[in-house]
């Protein structure tokens, strides 16, 4: 179970053990109702969100990793392909570039994501037609919102609980 909350206070129990109080959002209520006082839980506390796009981008990639694990289990290694799928599904901006096959590495250095669209023969020369995506770092707020919404949809399609991810991505419908 993953939760997002705010630190409220620290205190001592009647047994003089240290207690920490976190205030969580109402939408987690269903997750904590079955907690047992006699059970030992493992708790990890980390800073959940920062309104900066850089932090949002890190969480977006973490969610893409979770989608990859949900889809591929122990064989997960498709983060890049899932990102491209999300860009395509979100209608992200791209341009087509027709280059010789050996220029692919140059495109990978210049664009966040590329996708081979087709191979073309022009006379005796071979070319690859690539969709070259500008990526999330070049997106405005609306485009980033659409991309995050698409990734959340993809996560939901994989059966992932997206309540936590909506919070850390600071996403409002």
Image (cartoon, rainbow, N blue to C red):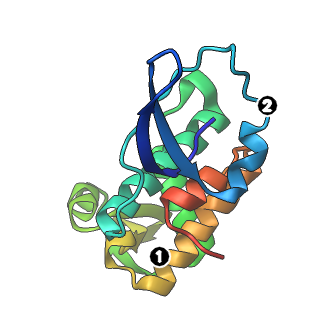
Spatial CA distance of label 2 from label 1 is: 36 Å
Q: Is residue 100 above or below residue 46?
A: below
**Residue 135 seen anywhere in this rendered image of the structure:** no
Residue at horizontal 69%, vertical 44%?
A: 160
**Residue 62 seen anywhere in this rendered image of the structure:** yes
Closer to us: 48 or 13: 13
Task: Find numbered disc 2 in the image and state the secondary structure of the residue it sits on.
Answer: loop
Image location (x, y in percent) of residue 21: 50, 41
Q: Is residue 99 above or below residue 78?
A: below
Task: Find numbered disc 1 in the image and state the secondary structure of the residue it sits on.
Answer: helix
Tell me which label, 2 or 1, sits earlier in the chain.
2
Residue at horizontal 46%, vertical 35%?
A: 20
Q: Which residue is mark 1?
A: 144
Please give the count of numbered marks on the rendered protein: 2
Q: Are marks 2 and 1 in contact (CB under 8 Å)?
A: no
The C terminus sits in image quarter = bottom right
Closer to us: 141 or 22: 22
Residue at horizontal 65%, vertical 36%?
A: 70
Closer to us: 166 or 79: 166
Q: Which residue is mark 2?
A: 34
């Amino acid at each position: 179970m993953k939760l997002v909350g705010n630190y409220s206070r620290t205190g001592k129990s009647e047994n003089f053990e240290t207690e920490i109080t976190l205030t969580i959002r109402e939408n987690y209520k269903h997750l904590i109702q079955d907690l047992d006082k006699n059970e030992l839980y493992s708790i990890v506390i980390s800073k959940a969100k920062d309104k900066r796009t850089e932090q949002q981008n890190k969480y977006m990639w973490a969610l893409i990793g979770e989608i990859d694990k949900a889809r591929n289990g122990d064989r997960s290694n498709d983060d890049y392909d899932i990102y491209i799928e999300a860009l395509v599904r979100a209608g992200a901006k791209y341009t087509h570039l027709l280059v010789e096959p050996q220029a692919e590495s140059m495109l990978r250095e210049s664009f966040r994501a590329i996708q081979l669209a087709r191979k073309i023969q022009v006379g005796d020369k071979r070319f690859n037609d690539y969709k070259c995506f500008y990526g999330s770092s070049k997106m405005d707020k609306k485009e980033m919102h659409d991309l995050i919404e698409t990734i959340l949809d993809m996560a939901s399609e994989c059966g992932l609980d997206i309540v936590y991810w909506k919070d850390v991505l600071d996403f409002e419908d």
